[in-house]
Each structure stands twice: as structure tokens, then as C-alpha cells.
Amino acid sequence: MIAVQIIAQLPESLQTVTGFFTKGGLFMWPLLLCSIVALTTIILRTFALREKNVLPLVVESEMERLVPGASAERLARIVHYDPSSLARIVRVALAHLRWPRSENVDTVQTRARHEMVRLEKGLVLLEVITGIAPLIGLIGTVSGLIHVFASLGLSAGSADAKQIALGISEALSCTIFGLGIAVPSLVAFVYFSKKVEVMSVEMESLVTDLLSKCYYGRLAGETPPPRQVIPASPPAPVPMT
């Protein structure tokens, strides 16, 4: 009774939304939780996957400006305090320049996989919500239809047809809400996944080019050549007097 009075005091738009959730049944609330999680994830990933946060222009331009064989001290200073994913990978590459190139590449690839996991953080939630939201909506619809047909078996009459139609329409609200959550979640998941893939390929290209410049003139697995011992020339004969 109190809830009905509170709903009656709300504006008309809020009454419509509140009535939609109230009539939809118990399974509307898990769907509401899914929608909040999906919306929060989309907002957070939108800010986290901005290009300036992953591929800052100052780091990218300095990597492109570096001359093959030149010193990378300026680039090391730039990426030292930069929190971006590209800067973290570059720091690992520059920290192991004394290693053979093959070992440095393996270390950089390991760090790059770690950064990929960081960039994809939260996307699994969108994938899960895309799958379970329609299923929860379907369960809610089936549950509502069970109640409708159970009440139909208890009483019969022409007046009950309107109640049955109303109950069925309310039961279908769960399916509509579940699909309404799943569709934008799927779109966001595909968009963010593709964006992460494109940025990872770009980072790989930049770092590969950086290693080529830093190892310019050095062969993979090259070892210093052995020192050549030049034999001393025989002493000149001393003339006998």
C-alpha cells in the first residue's frame, strides 16, 4: 500500500518506469543489475581506451623521429613517467638493449601480452551480459506465463480474457528488457574488441620499428670477433764488426 502511494506521487514518466519494473516480476531486478554493470563497463572502457591513453602522440612521434643507430636517451626520459601501455612496452625494450635481440623481443612480447590483458579488462563482463540477459528475460517471461495460465485454470469467464492478455504482456516485458540490454552490450563488446586489436597491431608495429633502429648495425646473436694476434717481426740482424 505504501509503495502504491509512493508511485502515485512520482511524475508520470517515473511512474511508467517504476510500473514497468513492478509489473515485470522478480526477474526484472537481475536484469536491472545487468544493465547497470553493462553501462558502467561501457563508460569506463570508453575513457580507458582513448587513443591518448594507450598511444600518446608524444611517445609515438619520438619513436618515429629516432634515427637508426642513434641514442634513445631522450625517448627513455619521455616514457619514464608516462603511464600509457605503449610507454610501458617501450620501457621494457629500452631496459634490455644489452641483451641479444631475440631475447629482447621475447621479453617485449611477454609485456605486450600483459598490456593486452589490461586493455581487455572488463570486456568479459559485456560478453557475459550479452549471453545471460536474454536468458534471464526468457526465464522471467516463462515464469510470468506460468502464473497467468495457473490463474486461468482456477477461474473462467469473459472478464478473465482481459486479465490473461494483460498478464501475458507483462510477462513479455522481461524478454524485451533482456534484449534491450543484450543488443547494446554486444555492440560495445565488438567495438571495444576491435579497437583493442587495432591498437595492439599499431603498438607492435611501432615497437618492432624501434627495435630495428636500436639494433641497427648489430646482427642477431652476433658475438664479438676473436682478437687477432699479429706475430712480431723478427729482429733485424746486427751487423758484425
Image (cartoon, rainbow, N blue to C red):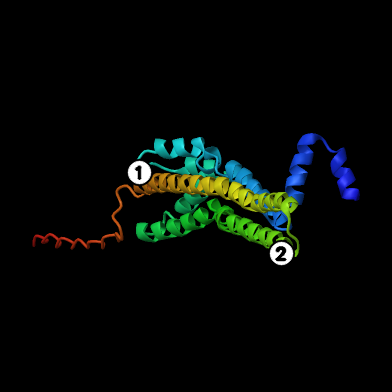
Whole-number angstrom distance, CA of label 1 to CA of label 2: 86 Å
Q: Position of residue 31 (x, y in %)?
A: 67, 54
Q: Position of residue 114 (x, y in %)?
A: 51, 57
Judged left or right of residue 193, residue 154 is: right
The answer to whether residue 87 of the structure is visible from this angle is no
Judged left or right of residue 3, residue 173 is: left
Tag 2 residue: 153
**SS category of the residue bearing label 2:** helix
Q: Residue at x 46, y 38 (%)?
A: 60
User: Where does the C terminus fall, quadrant-wise?
Assistant: bottom left
The relative height of residue 224 versus residue 50 in the rendered view (above or below) is: below
Q: Amino acid at mark 1?
A: Gly
Tag 1 residue: 69
Name the front one of labels 1 and 2.
2
Pick the residue in front: 239 or 167: 167
Number of other residues with Cα within 10 Å of mark 2, as a class: few under 14, some 14 to 19, many 20 or more? few
* Location of residue 138 (image quadrant): bottom right
Pick the residue in front: 128 or 25: 25
Q: Position of residue 166 (x, y in %)?
A: 70, 49
**SS category of the residue bearing label 1:** loop
The reply to whether the C-beta atoms of the residues labelled 1 and 2 are less than 8 Å apart is no
Judged left or right of residue 214, residue 217 is: left
The answer to whether residue 9 of the structure is visible from this angle is yes
Number of the label disc, if any, that sits on residue 180:
none
Q: Amino acid at mark 2?
A: Gly
Q: Position of residue 215 (x, y in %)?
A: 35, 50
Q: Residue at x 52, y 45 (%)?
A: 187
Extreme residue toward the left, this view: 240
Number of other residues with Cα within 10 Å of mark 1, as a class: few under 14, some 14 to 19, many 20 or more? few
Mark with earlier residue (1, 2): 1
